[in-house]
Amino acid sequence: MNLKIISSTDRPNSNALLVSNYVQRLYAAHGVEVEVLSLEDFPLQHVVGGKYGKNIPQVEEFIDPIINADGLIFVIPEYNGSFPGILKVFVDYLPFPEAFEKMPMAFIGEASGAFGGLRSVEQFQMIANYRNALQFPERVFISRVEKELDEEEGLSDSFKEKLLNSQVENFIKFVESVQQKEIDQLV
Ligand SMILES: Cc1cc2nc3c(=O)[nH]c(=O)nc-3n(C[C@H](O)[C@H](O)[C@H](O)COP(=O)(O)O)c2cc1C
């Protein structure tokens, strides 16, 4: 199963990347090797000037592994009551309309505030919905992320840690069932 975790900010040393790396280990514990991709590596310098709809090899190289994945896990911080601008730039350079069509997606929010990225995730889900993604309903919101997350130990709130493990376990099953349905339609 080819899953990718998208650390959805270009901020260096981000909590999103720490969360993503931790979640990658949870997937490994469930027997699924998952790659983390960071929007820090989105080739922003190659899209300056608004090169929408153009063939940009550096952009294609970045997005190809993402659009060819079996499922995506977005780790999204909250910036100004929303998601980071780089995440919208990334989406605006995806092939339209097919890129997220029937793509299984799971969401994890993180923020220093009390709502743990609820707003950033829900606003991004509106876009995922518009692009016909298959959104996994178990979401996890990590509030006070600086205090809550230990890179090695995970989340100090055991209930949140349980939710995170549940999301990992059930998202794997969700992706498997989507794949199975696609096979069933072929036979
Ligand atoms: C530009 C910017 C805007 C932010 N706006 C919010 C906000 O609206 N609500 C909130 O709870 N935290 C806000 N924060 C704090 C971040 O959510 C918090 O530091 C988060 O862990 C940053 O994510 P990152 O480390 O993955 O970049 C903001 C941080 C930045 C850099």
Image (spheres, rainbow, N blue to C red):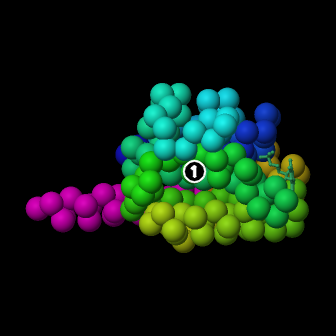
- The amino acid sitting under disc 1 is Asp
Q: Which residues are magenta?
A: 165-187
Q: Is residue 89 visible?
A: yes
The main secondary structure of the magenta stretch is helix
- 85 over 170 or under it: above or below: above
Left or right: 24, with 45 as reference point: left
Q: Residue at x 63, y 41 (%)?
A: 50
Q: Residue at x 64, y 62 (%)?
A: 124
Asked whether residue 153 is drawn in magenta, I would say no
Q: Quick one: quadrant of the C terminus?
A: bottom left
Q: Is mark 1 within 8 Å of ligand 1?
A: no
Q: Which quarter of the picture shows residue 45?
A: top right
Left or right: 158, with 20 as reference point: right
Residue 185, image x and y in percent? Answer: 18, 65
Q: Nearer the viewer, residue 55 or 58?
A: 55
Left or right: 151, with 34 as reference point: right
Q: Nearer the viewer, residue 131 or 165?
A: 131
Q: Residue furthest left?
A: 187
Asked whether residue 181 is drawn in magenta, I would say yes
Q: Is residue 163 visible?
A: no
- 122 over 50 or under it: above or below: below
Q: Which quarter of the picture shows residue 76?
A: bottom right
- 13 over 124 or under it: above or below: above
Q: Nearer the viewer, residue 70 or 82?
A: 82
Q: Secondary structure at mark 1?
A: helix
Q: Residue at x 69, y 45 (%)?
A: 86
Label 1 environment density (alpha carbons within 10 Å; few <14, some 14–19, many ≥20): few
Residue 2, image x and y in percent? Answer: 41, 43
Residue 61, image x and y in percent? Answer: 48, 30
Q: Residue at x 51, y 68 (%)?
A: 130
Residue 90, image x and y in percent? Answer: 60, 46
Residue that numbered label 1 is attached to:
92
